[in-house]
């Protein structure tokens, strides 16, 4: 299990107004054992973890990752970045767009201890990206909301929104989430893809994790405030 999921479980318990002894009783372990679990000093058995997940109304996978993915919202985040002004001549490299999405999710977690989209980001060669990023791009293209230009001189795939995309629904995004997306766009407008790739590679979450590992959101809380996005 991802190390920082203990904090996620503690937050769920507090939100539900439950004490440690109440939760311990419901999953049939001692209070001291449960306290050690929340402190990350011990693990639960599969049956204990299943009882805990059921109590909080989440799946075992969601409990392990501390995430509840919102795929529709993630696709709307892509559209939000495309209409944020970050794109040069209305087009943005596919790799740069992936990094902007990562920064927005992890910056939101830095401030609120929750991800904007709930997607799981994997550490790959060119930076952190969810497995579903490429699927999301393909679906937005098939839906007629974006186009893809593969004729750039450097071989990059450039993403840009269509007229339908400009009118696309962003109802899953709150005003303060759109504001953060705009702030990140302003910072990275005009910057080369290599610059944002290097920035994400130099961040603590990427540096600590192994290749192909899912990056725990909690690692970003240890990052320098000036290096979150």
Image: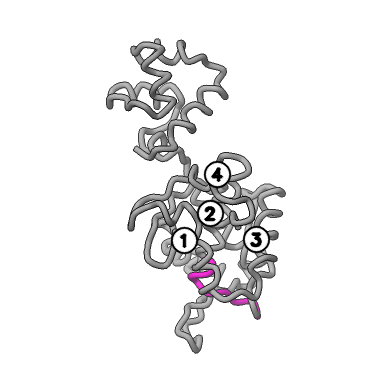
Image quarter hosting the N terminus:
top left
Q: Secondary structure at mark 3?
A: helix
Which circle, 1 or 4, is nearer the viewer?
Answer: 4
Tag 4 residue: 221
Residue 147 at x, y = what percent? 53, 75
Q: Which mark is residue 74?
A: 2
- Asked if the stretch drawn in magenta spans residue 91, the answer is yes
Q: Earlier in the sequence, mark 2 or mark 3?
A: 2
Image vertical order of residue 180 relative to residue 46, above or below: below
Q: Contact, CB < 8 Å: mark 2 with mark 3?
A: no
Q: Earlier in the sequence, mark 3 or mark 1?
A: 1
Asked whether 162 or 158 is in front, the reply is 158
Local crowd size for mark 3, using a 10 Å CA cut-off: few (<14), some (14–19), many (≥20): many
Q: CA distance from mark 1 to mark 4?
A: 27 Å
Local crowd size for mark 4, using a 10 Å CA cut-off: few (<14), some (14–19), many (≥20): some
Q: Secondary structure at mark 2?
A: helix
Which circle, 3 or 4, is nearer the viewer?
Answer: 4
Local crowd size for mark 1, using a 10 Å CA cut-off: few (<14), some (14–19), many (≥20): some
In this picture the colour scheme is one colour
Q: CA distance from mark 3 to mark 1?
A: 21 Å
The span shown in magenta is 89-97
Q: CA distance from mark 2 to mark 3?
A: 16 Å
Residue 175 at x, y = what percent? 71, 49
Q: Earlier in the sequence, mark 1 or mark 4?
A: 1
Q: Which mark is residue 189?
A: none
Q: Contact, CB < 8 Å: mark 2 with mark 1?
A: yes
Image vertical order of residue 68 relative to residue 195, above or below: above
Indicate the quadrant where residue 15 lies. top right
Q: Earlier in the sequence, mark 2 or mark 1?
A: 2
Residue 12 at x, y = what percent? 51, 27
Q: Secondary structure at mark 4?
A: helix
């Amino acid at each position: 299990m991802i190390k920082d999921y203990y904090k996620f479980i503690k937050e769920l318990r507090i939100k539900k107004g439950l004490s440690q002894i109440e939760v311990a009783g419901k999953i049939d372990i001692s209070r001291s054992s449960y306290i050690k679990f929340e402190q990350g000093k011990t693990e639960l058995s599969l049956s204990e973890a299943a009882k805990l997940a059921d109590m909080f109304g989440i799946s075992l996978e969601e409990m392990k990752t501390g995430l509840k993915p919102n795929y529709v919202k993630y696709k709307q985040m892509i559209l939000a970045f495309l209409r944020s002004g970050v794109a040069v001549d209305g087009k943005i490299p596919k790799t740069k767009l992936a990094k902007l999405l990562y920064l927005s999710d992890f910056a939101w977690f830095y401030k609120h201890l929750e991800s904007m989209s709930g997607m799981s980001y994997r550490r790959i060669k060119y930076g952190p990206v969810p497995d579903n990023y490429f699927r999301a791009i393909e679906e937005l293209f098939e839906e007629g909301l974006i186009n893809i230009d593969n004729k750039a001189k450097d071989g990059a795939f450039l993403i840009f929104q269509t007229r339908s995309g400009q009118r696309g629904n962003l109802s899953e995004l709150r005003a303060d989430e759109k504001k953060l997306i705009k702030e990140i766009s302003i910072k990275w407008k005009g910057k080369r893809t290599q610059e944002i790739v290097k920035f994400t590679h130099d961040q603590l979450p990427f540096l600590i994790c192994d290749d192909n590992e899912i990056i725990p959101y909690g690692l970003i809380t240890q990052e320098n405030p000036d290096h979150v996005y």
